[in-house]
Image: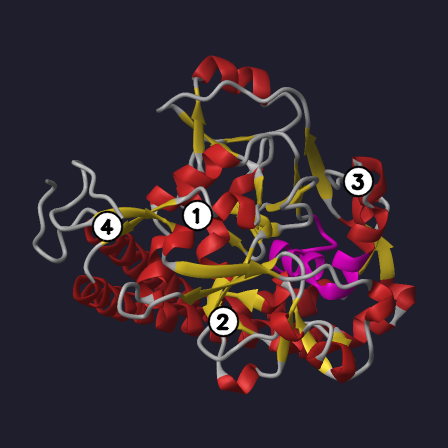
C-alpha cells in the first residue's frame, strides 16, 4: 500500500488484487444445462441490489457443480456483481451479497464475486459502495472503450486503484451509506408495489382481450405515430428540451436525462410532427429498444430525438392503455421477434407499424385510465421521495470518498 497526496489523511491507494480475491464465472455451455440440480448465477439474477434466483431457470447437474465447477460455487457473504451488458448508470443495481438462502449456487460467465483476503484490512460493504463511486466508474470507463455498455472481467479489475481508509473508518462509512441506501430501497419498494398494483388491474381488465385474436389490429391503424429519424442534433447547455432515448424507461420518463438544443436546431429537428404531453414514446433500437412511457406533464415546447417513435391517441386508443399494452410481455415478445441486428438490435418503423395489438372498447380503456390515475398519483409521491433519497445517498457517497463523512481532510 502507498499513500497519495490527494487522498484524505490516513487513506491509502491499493490495487484491488492486494486486498481482495475476485473471480469470474466459467463459460458453462447450453448443452450442460439441466432441468434441476444446482442453479447457475446469471446477469439477470442480480437486479435492484438484490439476488432473485426465480428470474431464470438454468441449472447444472450436482455432479458437475460439486466436482468440475466446485471452485466456482458461491459462499454466503460473497459480493456478487454482473459484469457484462451493463449500462453504467444502472451498475449500482447489479451488485449484491450472496446469502445462505441462495445456496447452493454456481457462478456463470458474466458474473464475478469478491472476497476479502484479510477482513482486518478491508470491509466488503465498504468495497460495495466503492464500486458505485465516480472513482471506480471513471477508471473502468477508461479501460473499456468503444462501447456504451460495460463488459469487463478480472483483467480490468486488477488495474483499478482502490481508495482505502483504515478499517474502522471503512466500517463507519459503510454504516452511514447503509442507512441512506435503506431509505431509497424503501421508496423503491413502495414504487414497485404501485407498479404491481397497476399491472394487476391491467391484467384483470384486459387479460381476456389478449386471448381474443379477433380484436387485434395493426398499431398504425389504431394510433397516429411520428417516426423521428435523421442525424443526432447538436446539444447545448440551455434552450429547448430534447427528449432522447435515454429519457425513456419502462413505464416512466426520466426528466433528469433531458438534453437541450437551440431554437434554430429545433426547427430543423421537428419536421415530422409535434409531440404533446401524454403521447407515448417508443425506443426503436439499442440497449433501450422496446422501452415505452408517456411524455409527462411539466414540459412546454420540446423536441424528440432520433431512435424514437411518438404514438398519439385517436378514437381507438387512449394513451394510458396503449402504454400498458406496448409494455406487456406478449407485445414486447413480438417487438423483439421483429427486431434485427446482431451487435445493436433495432426494429424498423414499417415492421413496428404492422405489429398487431389487442384493441379493447374505448369505454373500458377510459375506465382503466381513470383508475390508473389514482394509483399513479400515489406512485408519483413515492417517486418524488425516491428522488430525494437518491440525491441524499449520492451526496453522502461523494462526501464519504472525499473523507468528509469521517472528518478527514485531503493530505
Query: Magenta-highlighted stretch: main secondary structure?
Result: helix
Q: Earlier in the sequence, mark 4 or mark 1?
A: 1
What label sits on residue 401 in the rendered view?
A: 4
Percent x, y of residue 358:
80, 62
Secondary structure, mark 1, is loop
What label sits on residue 297 in the rendered view?
A: 1
Q: Is residue 126 magenta?
A: no
Q: Tell us which disc is closer to us: 3 or 4.
A: 4
Which residue corresponds to mark 3? 342
Tell me how far mark 3 sits from mark 4, CA to CA.
Answer: 40 Å
Bin the neighbour count of mark 4 within 10 Å (Cα to Cα): few under 14, some 14-19, many 20 and up.
many
Task: Using residue 385 as the reference point, say whether residue 159 is left or right of it.
Answer: right
Which residue corresponds to mark 2? 50
Q: Looking at the image, which residue is at 29% across and 69% down?
A: 178
| Residue 277 appears in the picture as rendered | no
Task: Using residue 399 as the reference point, say whether residue 62 is left or right of it.
Answer: right
Secondary structure, mark 2, is strand
| Residue 63 appears in the picture as rendered | yes
Task: Using residue 8 as the reference point, say whether residue 276 is left or right of it.
Answer: right
Q: Tell us which disc is closer to us: 1 or 2.
A: 2
Q: Earlier in the sequence, mark 2 or mark 3?
A: 2
Secondary structure, mark 3, is loop
Percent x, y of residue 191:
44, 69
Segment tinted magenta in the rendering: 314-333
Q: Is residue 322 magenta?
A: yes
Tell me how far mark 2 sits from mark 3, CA to CA.
Answer: 30 Å
The reply to whether the C-beta atoms of the residues labelled 3 and 4 are less than 8 Å apart is no
Tell me how far mark 1 sits from mark 2, CA to CA.
Answer: 32 Å
Amino acid at each position: 500500500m502507498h499513500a497519495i497526496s490527494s487522498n484524505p489523511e490516513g487513506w491509502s491507494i491499493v490495487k484491488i488484487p492486494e486486498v481482495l480475491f475476485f473471480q469470474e464465472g466459467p463459460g458453462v455451455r447450453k448443452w450442460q444445462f439441466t432441468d434441476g440440480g444446482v442453479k447457475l448465477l446469471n446477469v439477470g439474477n442480480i437486479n435492484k441490489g438484490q439476488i432473485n434466483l426465480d428470474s431464470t431457470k438454468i441449472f447444472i447437474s450436482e455432479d458437475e457443480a460439486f466436482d468440475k465447477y466446485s471452485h466456482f460455487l458461491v459462499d454466503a457473504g460473497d459480493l456478487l456483481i454482473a459484469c457484462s451488458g451493463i449500462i453504467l448508470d444502472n451498475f449500482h443495481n447489479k451488485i449484491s451479497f450472496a446469502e445462505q438462502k441462495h445456496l447452493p449456487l454456481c457462478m456463470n460467465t458474466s458474473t464475478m464475486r469478491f472476497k476479502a483476503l484479510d477482513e482486518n484490512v478491508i470491509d466488503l460493504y465498504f468495497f460495495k459502495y466503492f464500486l458505485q463511486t465516480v472513482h471506480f466508474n471513471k477508471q473502468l470507463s477508461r479501460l473499456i472503450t468503444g462501447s456504451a455498455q460495460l463488459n469487463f472481467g478480472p483483467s480490468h479489475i486488477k488495474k483499478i486503484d482502490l481508495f482505502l481508509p483504515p478499517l474502522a473508518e471503512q466500517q463507519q462509512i459503510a454504516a452511514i451509506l447503509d442507512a441512506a441506501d435503506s431509505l431509497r430501497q424503501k421508496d423503491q419498494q413502495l414504487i414497485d408495489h404501485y407498479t404491481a398494483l397497476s399491472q394487476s388491474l391491467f391484467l384483470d381488465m384486459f387479460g381476456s382481450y389478449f386471448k381474443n385474436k379477433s380484436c387485434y389490429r395493426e398499431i398504425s391503424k389504431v394510433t397516429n405515430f411520428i417516426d423521428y429519424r435523421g442525424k443526432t442534433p447538436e446539444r447545448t447547455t440551455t434552450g429547448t428540451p430534447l427528449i432522447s432515448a435515454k429519457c425513456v424507461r419502462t413505464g416512466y420518463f426520466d426528466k433528469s436525462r433531458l438534453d437541450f438544443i437551440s431554437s434554430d436546431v429545433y426547427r430543423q429537428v421537428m419536421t415530422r410532427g409535434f409531440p404533446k404531453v401524454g403521447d407515448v414514446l417508443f425506443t426503436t433500437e439499442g440497449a433501450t429498444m422496446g422501452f415505452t412511457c408517456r411524455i409527462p406533464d411539466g414540459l412546454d415546447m420540446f423536441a424528440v430525438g432520433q431512435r424514437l417513435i411518438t404514438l398519439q391517441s385517436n378514437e381507438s386508443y387512449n394513451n394510458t392503455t396503449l402504454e400498458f399494452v406496448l409494455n406487456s410481455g406478449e407485445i414486447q415478445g413480438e417487438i423483439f421477434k421483429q427486431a434485427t441486428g446482431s451487435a445493436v438490435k433495432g426494429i424498423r418503423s414499417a415492421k413496428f407499424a404492422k405489429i398487431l395489438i389487442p384493441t379493447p372498447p374505448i369505454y373500458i380503456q377510459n375506465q382503466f385510465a381513470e383508475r390508473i390515475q389514482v394509483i399513479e398519483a400515489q406512485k408519483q409521491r413515492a417517486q418524488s421521495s425516491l428522488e430525494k433519497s437518491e440525491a441524499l445517498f449520492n451526496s453522502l457517497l461523494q462526501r464519504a470518498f472525499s473523507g468528509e463523512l469521517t472528518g478527514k481532510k485531503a493530505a
